[in-house]
Image (tube, grey):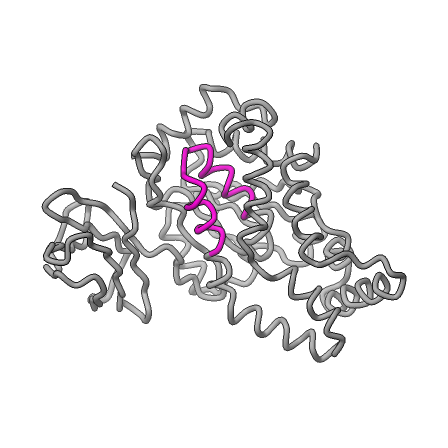
Amino acid sequence: MENKYKVEQTRKNHFHFEIPMANKEQEVEVFLMENSQPNFLLKTKQENFDIDLNELSHRPYFLIKTKANQYITAERTLPVEGMNNFRDMGGYETDSGKTVQWGKLYRSDHIHNATDKGIAYLQTLGIHTIIDYRSNVETQKYPNKQISDQVTTYQMDPSAHAAELAAQFQSSKEEEDANLINEIIEQKEKGTLVDHSDVVLTQYHTFVTKKESQEAFSKMLQIVADPNAPAVVQHCRGGKDRTGFGSMLVLGTLGVKKEDLVEDYLLTAKNRIERNRIKMEGYKKLTSDPVVLNQLYSFIDTKPEFIEESIDTINNRYGSIENYVKKELKLTEQMVQQMKTMYLE
């Protein structure tokens, strides 16, 4: 069954459900899963409803039952204090009819900003592996908080930054924004400033084709295919570009449809609305040039055509994401099947 059930924690222990129903007379039953056992919560014919739960000692998973089928669902973006884009990639249906398991594959922004409370929450998720796409400069400036001694971190930089972002990454914390703006102004004055959307599209094309990127994402997939890896978190700085491409590769290798790959990518836009507003307010204190501001916004914006550039380049050249990871990223058939065994149900 295609998973279109959605649940979101709108305030502490208050959950909003969206359960699309083809038959308006159909009833659904909702259960809270506790120690793998369903605990009945309610029965309803409503497509949108809310449930308040008592204090929880664990991340909640919900069983949705109809007469025809049943499905486990959960909130996708998790309430990790200090972070804005930590989310679960479970719940997507694949072309084989199976579903990506919840609680095994995560994507996020960097863990540097997590508060002590946020780290305590992460410690409940059973994370074993972190894949950090940031450069040495980024990790030195913004070192991740440690979740536990049991977590192994792998750093792999795809080296696919646009020129302006590369300049920003090389700056000190205090000078990042100013140096980025100066780089854009210099390009504008020289007449070499490329349309902001084209810059980002080029980066997403480069993820597919550049040798350094291929090596980094090949290593990532081999780690994800290791039976000892789950639960896995992959992240960069904001959890959009490098993480967006890596997440698309994992889900695509598992057989998730293009429309869901794009939908998963676009959740970053929703999660970063407030973060982007604050970021642009900071930029506006340094420049009022609309051309510069548009260019700046392009690097924090999340558009479907960005990830579609990567997906379409792969599909046009290799026929499928699975073919691409086998031919260019050197995953074996055994590794691909191991991933499907580990992460699908």
Q: Is residue 128 left or right of residue 299?
A: left
Compared to 178, does 205 lie above or below? above
How many numbered circles are shown?
A: 0
Vertically, is 255 above or below 192? Answer: above
Q: Position of residue 71 (x, y in %)?
A: 22, 45
Rendered-image quadrant of the C terminus: top left
Q: Is residue 214 left or right of residue 292?
A: left
Seen at 9% across and 46% down, the residue is 67
Q: Residue placed at 54% from the left, 23% from the top?
A: 326
Residue at the location (52% across, 33% down)? 221
User: Does 334 appear in magenta?
Assistant: no
**Quadrant, the N terminus:** top left
Q: Is residue 259 magenta?
A: yes
Would residue 25 be found to the left or right of residue 136 on screen? left
Front residue of 260 and 55: 260
Q: Which secondary structure class fits the magenta region best?
A: helix
In this view, the residue in front, 134 or 67, is 67
Q: Is residue 192 above or below residue 1?
A: below
* Nearer to me, 51 or 94: 94
Residue 291 screen position, x and y as percent: 74, 69
Q: Position of residue 285 (x, y in %)?
A: 71, 80
- Residue located at (80% from left, 59% from top): 193
Farthest right residue?
A: 190
Magenta segment? 244-266
Res. 308 image quadrant: top right
